[in-house]
Amino acid sequence: MGMKATLFGIGFLLVCLASAAAGDVRLNLWPMPKSVSHGIQTLRLSNDFVLRTEGSKYADASGILKEGFSRLLDIIEVGHAIENSTNLNHLPLLKGLHVVISSPSDELQYGVDESYKLSVPTNGNPIYAHLETQTVYGALHGLQTFSQLCHFNFKSRVIEVFPAPCTIDDQPRFSYRGLLIDTSRHYQPLPMIKKVIDAMAYTKLNVLHWHIVDSQSFPLEIPSYPKLWNGAYSTSERYTMDDAAEIVRYAQRRGVNVLAEIDVPGHALSWGKGYPSLWPSPDCQEPLDVSNEFTFRVIDGILSDFKKTFNFRFVHLGGDEVDTGCWVITPHVKKWLIKHRMNESDAYKYFVLRAQHIALSHGFEIVNWEETFNNFGKQLNPKTVVHNWLGGGVAQKVVLAGLRCIVSNQDKWYLDHLDATWQGFYMNEPLTNITNPNEQKLVIGGEVCMWGERVDASDLEQTIWPRAAAAAERLWTPYDKLAKNPKQVIGRLSHFRCLLTQRGVAAAPLAGLGRAVPEEPGSCYKQ
Amino acid sequence: MGMKAGFFWLGFLLACILASTSADETLNLWPMPVSVNHGLQTHCLRKNFALKTEGSKYADGSGILKDGFSRLLDVIDVSRAADKLTNFNNFPMLLGLHVIISSSSDELQYGVDESYKLSVPGNGNPNYAQLEAQTVYGALHGLQTFSQLCHLNLETRIIEVRPTPCTIEDQPRFSYRGLLIDTSRHYLPLRTIKSVIDAMAYSKLNVLHWHIVDSQSFPLEIPSFPKLWNGAYSASERYTMVDAAEIVRYAQRRGINVLAEFDVPGHAMSWGKGYPSLWPSPNCSEPLDVSNEFTFQVINGILSDFKRVFKFRFVHLGGDEVKTDCWVTTPRVGRWLSKKGMNKSDAYKYFVLQVQKIALSHGYEVINWEETFNNFGKQLSPKTVVQNWLDNSVPEKVVAAGLRCIISNQDKWYLDHMDQSWRDFYTNEPLSNITDPTQKKLVIGGEVCMWGEYVDGSDIQQTIWPRAAAAAERLWTSYDKLAKDPEQVIGRLAHFRCLLNQRGIAAAPLLGYGRAVPTEPGSCYKQ
């Protein structure tokens, strides 16, 4: 190492110390990476910024990296015309990005390595940024972070990269970072679902929990039982299984898994539109008829169809809010209960465990809502992940029982609660009161829930964003780098919400409650 | 003509009679064309549905038609259709669309011929739909109408075209069908503006009135006076002149002209951020200093820069809500007034007429808000178009004075007024109380106004749509085909709003007022 490099190294260290000591207001990254060291120089992005992959073991036959890189260029320009480098611009030129991925596989599965190391040097001829990762999905996260270092300068008409030099080491705190959408209460057109996935990628969320069907409508085609989608609101408010496969493919190419849900036996009235024998009776239509073998054949058919399209490790079987009243007052079901010596709660348990058994036979691991745990936790299959929603305190009990848990406590992480503020989303800590390291590991992550009663295509995005992004930092960033007071991140989050709007995502202002509209004229960065 | 064809025509006639006598639920076209004759058959679209242009005089060197056709394939969901048509499909197949345009020009100017004739034949071999138009812009409207005849059947995966056979002759009632957006109160990202333009094309609106600058911020680059955009909210809430040119280009390729506005002298405080001498004084910063020649030099510079980018025949010079107090209370301006022997109103008139002269010298015709007419209508240039907004009795006075008029009465057509429902937008008649045919012609159209105080990238779409679409039918469809009672169109408009959703536009439910959210679970078509 020559003299110059050493001197540079010292200068670099000094700068790092300075920026670590002072509150660094100019580092507008969201979610905040695990570790960032940086100087204070600015580079200029080459007009023909290139992707290099020499030395990478990942061949990119499916084009996931190439497409991700092309989306990167698109989102850093956000529609502005970049002008040919003018003479008055003296910034050093960043020629390209060199991506080195060590795993050849592009399988996206739960727990896939999402870490990356991004460095932007200020020397070299030409200068290249470097991105090293285990998997292509880690690389996609690195591209998102890189996009946030890029800023279009309106005076010089070039894209500047700031701050440089810069080294970012990053990996998620939790491996499950979810967002629920609900296509039963209101149908969501395919372009809307894709836009939600785009924004999830920007925020490094990685599971789209698709609550496909509920009491109100059954929009998805099930080839094994083709009358099920007779329960759709209309002939056009439907998804074919090809559409579902396209959603899965689209999400996967952005590093997002799709968790499909059927919510049985409680939230399933719409199933009986096509197959009325799934109802206890035409007058008492919910929950699904526990006494009818056909019910379980249909569940088996659905899960067998799911397995061909939804290749995530988990399937969600619901199990919440089961009002068993219909089972007791419908004579043929009542007779069956007596014959099998079951009371209502026994039958609820029987139903859930049998559905679990079917899912396991198809090779899925299972997620169930917390009532199943609260009522018969000890009988749940050990492969169950319990999805908390009702309140605090459940996660502790779940992990104490040795089961895995996803945190979605409704008081903080339900997006349909418009009085739940972004501050509440930011501060909700999944590991509250869980101190044992082994138990902590059983909390695989958290999820924010966008229930669909009052959202359709017209208000979905602004109800989700930016509040879901606030939770995304809680789920991504190491605990000790999270702000203890949400006021500390307001500038950075508002910067990110403006970035979302520039990218075409209708993210609402921070001022006010959920889905707030701007209260008066003003800058995006201050609202 | 053989026997078979004879039978066919007989059937066609019968079908037409049926269709015109019964309420025609299958004809969900928005806005409703001038004339539609149709049968009750269904065709199916070949997967590789093709564009044919033999016999067309328009060479499409700029690709406007080709791009429009490719967008058509996109919005009718060709990618979701089955690759091979299944056997149980007995519908006659449409191989493509034959477009014949008689004008070779692609100049988009005020008053360009927008008519088209679209026909889908009953049988025939090979079977092509035919679209005849004077200009490529008429053809683009025809493509929009054709897209609304196409329905993806999710059971068969076939794109069905119905009703057929069908002949549609169409042309707009008014040549100016505008939508105002305001990028001063809130900056609107480029992608958001483009998405608004997309939806304007779907509803056959043809003028994007861009209220670029106002008191709150000055987002646009003006090369002649480069400090003007110092008045932007922030370094990134800006448009370069290249961005503006891109908006103009994007709109023009969709048949939409861009009307640029700066609003002088009243709504211009932000101008002085870069050039404080434009203010009467730092403490009294509005209206622009009438006594300073520099004010008019700046206006001249802006209009000279505008002329290179904004090719529309008109420029909008504002002129509303001028509070002249600062002119009187600022000693320097007060002295100037005395010297010139002007009172406040004289100075207001002087300012507006000076600016009109400058705009005319650059080859623009001018549009001013109605206060200019109300105060000194007789002195306005005869090339002035007066934009009504305050008073419903103004249009009749404007046309009686021989000037042209655009209708935007705030009690019905202001999109920022949340208490105005789509019914108000639909029933607002621009020619109320104007009976003289010559005077009627002076009403060149109307415009709905999306003032930006409470809208940004997060809520603009659902505030605009579907209410602007309701006005779009008023402005497009011939008077005698308009519903007298808006309840008659509710199903058709709901269908169109769901279509907008499917195309990725966040159009709000019809139930409720502006920007309503769905009140409960349900089908898009019923909300």
Image (cartoon, rainbow, N blue to C red):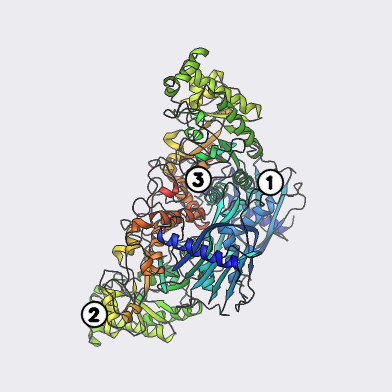
Chain letter of disc 1 in the image: B
Task: Determine whether the residue tagged by mark 2 lies in a helix, strand or loop.
Answer: helix
Q: Quadrant of the N terminus of chain B?
A: bottom right
For the residue carrying disc 2, how many other residues have a C-alpha within 10 Å: few (<14), some (14-19), or many (20+)? some
Q: Residue at x 65, y 42 (%)?
A: B115
Residue wearing tag 3: B469
Numbered tag placed on residue B136 in the rendering? 1
Instruction: Report the Cα–Cα distance between label 3 and label 2.
Output: 53 Å
At label 3, the amino acid type is Ala
Are circles 3 and 2 on residues that touch, CB within 8 Å? no
At label 2, the amino acid type is Ser
Chain letter of disc 2 in the image: A
**Where is residue B382, by image quadrant?**
top right
Say which label, 3 or 1, has the lower sequence index. 1
Residue wearing tag 2: A345
| Vertical placement of residue B320 versus B40, above or below | above
Image coords of residue A109 (percent x, y): 48, 78
